[in-house]
Image (tube, rainbow, N blue to C red):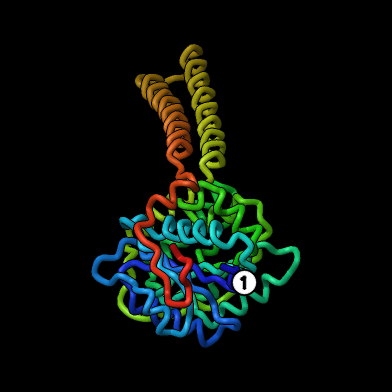
Amino acid sequence: MQAPALIVVTPVFEDAQAAARLCADLAGVCVPPPYIVAVDDGSVRQPLSPRMIAGAGLAGRVLRLKRNVGHQRAIAIGLDHVARHWPQAPRVVVMDCDGEDRPATVPELLAELEEAQVDVVVARRRGRVESLHFRLFYWLYKGLFRLLTGRQLAFGNFMALKPAALARLTAMGELATHVAGSVLISRLRWRARPLDRGSRYAGNSHMNFVGLVLHGFRGLMIFAEDVLVRVGTACALVAALAVAGGSTAVVLKSIGYATPGWFSVALGILFLVFLQTGAITLMTLMLTGVVRAGSVQPQDHAALVDAVLATGDDATAA
């Protein structure tokens, strides 16, 4: 099958109604019409049917997964499917199906992608409509992320890719953990396009506060080595200060400047600080090894696909 001019990859979990509306909106704004690769992430109550894609006048296929694997890995599976079947697809767009990634802004991403020195165009949110506590925690997370990694993460999954970017990202095990973080470490030439956030088509988000926190920590896992170096450096500095403080306490005690009980309290506290910095460094090192050992390999994606269901215009899906 010849590679479509534009492929849209979208994860769907119990949100078939929103996915159908997304297809209809994309059909109205994209020229030529996009080919849809929808990854049904183990939906039980509202499984997505290829008839919903065909009902919007589009061709496409639904990758029905054997179980729920999460938003990020579902995107990785969809991109891996595209890379195996259409490695030279001119343009690939990744977006959510709930309407918050507005179909009307897809042409803007594709226009930016025409630049020869750009491999990936990501959407940077111009405004958010979330609650105050969500925005507060998001601001704190961005600060923590920058402190621990030395990088700024200000975009999500809504992006457009060239073939070279598709090939590189799908060869990275980190893609299944955090899509945006994988773009940052891929060394691809990326550009951010400020875009307004849309409103959900229907229903409520399946992502709760715990899921958002886990998603944020997965972003840090991508930069495990950077976090290790920064945490280790900070711990070494604190340990050195603890040793210096302990040595000062010993000197003051030996020359008689220590009040009763002061020396033992000060030396005990500084010794505990020294032990804790060593423990934190050791734990960070162990977690880095666990993250690297447990990373998902690209060849594992196909094993999670239970069925490939295509519209009538695509007889080669299987």
Residue 266 visible in the picture? no
Nearest the eye: 221 or 59: 59
User: Where does the image place residue 127, in percent across and percent down from the top left?
Assistant: 51, 76
Kindly identify the residue that appears in the image at 50 percent across and 84 percent down: 27
Q: Secondary structure at mark 1?
A: strand
Residue 182 visible in the picture? yes
Q: Is residue 98 above or below residue 238?
A: below
User: Where does the image place residue 260, in percent across and percent down from the top left?
Assistant: 36, 19
User: Where does the image place residue 277, in percent across and percent down from the top left?
Assistant: 45, 30
The N terminus sits in image quarter? bottom right
Kindly identify the residue that appears in the image at 71 percent across and 72 percent down: 114
Residue that badge 1 annotates: 193
Q: Is residue 279 above or below residue 263?
A: below
- Name the quadrant containing residue 210: bottom left
User: Where does the image place residue 207, in percent across and percent down from the top left?
Assistant: 34, 64
Kindly identify the residue that appears in the image at 52 percent across and 21 percent down: 248
Kindly identify the residue that appears in the image at 61 percent across and 73 percent down: 5
* Amino acid type at image mark 1: Arg
Nearest the eye: 151 or 259: 151
Nearest the eye: 248 or 294: 294
Within 10 Å of the Cα at label 1, are there few (<14), some (14-19), or many (20+) other Cα atoms?
some
**21 with respect to 43 (left or right):** right
**198 with respect to 88 (left or right):** left
